[in-house]
Amino acid sequence: MEMKRVGRPGLAGILAALCLVPGPIWGAPAAAGPSAPSRPEVPAAEGLPLNPVDAAEALWKAYAERVDLDARTDLLHLEFKPGILSGAVAVSGTSADRGLLAGFYAELSASGLGIESSVEEVPNADDLKRLTWGIVKTPWGSLSSESDALADGRTPELRLPLGSRVELLLNRFDGLVLVKSTEGRVGWMRAKELSLRNDIAIVAWNRRSQVLVTALAAEIEVNGSGDGKTFLKAPFASELPIERKIPDGGWSVILPDGRTGILRAGDAVDHDEFAANEENLRRESPAGFLAKAAQSAEKLASAGWKKSEAGMSLPEGAYRLHDLILPSDPDRQARLGAPLSGGRRGSELKPGDLVFFGENGRVRYSGIWLGKGRFAADDPKRGGAAIFVFSTQPRADANGGLGPFLWAVRPEVSQLANPCLLSIRSHPFNQAPPAGAVRCRLR
């Protein structure tokens, strides 16, 4: 089946907003990449164009296809011009992945092309002034692949809840920062929505026990707000450190801006205890774990789940209630494992399987299989979530208007070795000290 992939135009769109002039790497003079004896032409017998710039572009296109470069998660944008030396290629652009860049340079070198590199690698410690992490301090943080989208007030591609951690890649010092989210998405955020931290401060934040908000509409009563009470929205999946437990139930939590507030017990769970229970179930009974995720999906759909209010899809929300972070895009969720055909009336599916719908092999919507011929998914027609009757009919109006069934995926949760499917607790951003997110290699 054909799967939709995002190609270079999206990546170019992100980096066009950077307004970067190719410059030195890490504040040092521009370093030459792997070199080879310069020559004006590449023999046609090698299967490459005669012009060195065209040859480099052809190699880049093939490399990007082979490593499945995705503009949503991979910040590697390169441009090619004639070099100063005869037959050499001047490579400029931006890279946030040294491994990907080194792999491409190795291919350029093996082809016999001379390289003059001025690629800027981010994050750059000097540009960031040692502030390498951000924590969302407003109820929602808006992430967009285009910086202009934030200025124009357009709907962001992702909304990150209070307490979400992001890795800073670039600080333009004009109110916008380029970040990488927990699922690996790269995009722009407003600096005023973030509490910027250095490595020491984020370690202190991560070492505290945390609470995870599980209610669809929770609020924090902010302390020290005078005679009147001030409340801050705490959206679903917000994560905050615990200052202390309250004897009659609930917690005093620390907000990213330094204030503290009271969160009711019924709106959240102690994440350490919650994560340990979910991990034990994943190891002891993977099928039982998936079945619990299906039950949560059904409960969320019945409780009035709305993607626009929750900031994530129903499958993401259901699995977040069981300590797992799914990719936010249905087409990326659809590549978490080998495709399942579903069988007659879904006979091959098990509760907790992810099911996908669309047309011409292109995934547009995802849902969670509940069993007995039913699945739960976001309903684009009415804005909320719903429970649908499964159909294998190849019609556009099938499955409640989500379209024809394409395939299903059964997440492998017994061992979370796939960085595309991480538990909240084991995520590199949440460690002390934290680490950068590993590149997610989808099927």
Image: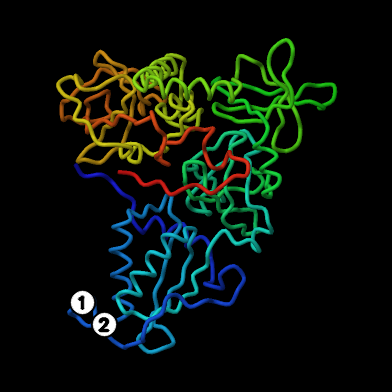
Q: Residue furthest right?
A: 227
Report x, y in % for residue 156: 50, 43
| Circles 1 and 2 in contact, beta carbons < 8 Å | yes
Q: Nearer the viewer, residue 256 or 431?
A: 431
* Figure check: 280 above or below 149: above
Question: Disc 2 designates what residue?
Answer: 42
- Whether 288 is drawn above or below 431: the answer is above
Pointer 1 residue: 46
> Could you classify mark 1 by the number of other residues whose Cα lies within 10 Å: few (under 14), some (14-19), or many (20 or more)?
few
**On the rendered structure, is 171 left or right of 421?**
right
User: Where does residue 157 sit, x and y in percent of width and height?
Assistant: 46, 43
* Residue at figure coordinates x 62%, y 27% from the top left: 234
Which quadrant would residue 378 be assigned to in this image? top left
Q: Is residue 303 left or right of residue 124?
A: left
- Calculate the distance from the C-alpha at mark 1 to the C-alpha at mark 2: 7 Å
Crowd band around label 2 with a 10 angstrom C-alpha radius: few (<14), some (14–19), many (20+):
some
Image quadrant holding the N terminus, namely: top left
Q: Quadrant of residue 374?
A: top left
- Give the residue type that dot 1 points to: Glu
* Amino acid type shown at disc 2: Val
| x and y percentages locating residue 108 in the rendered image | 34, 73
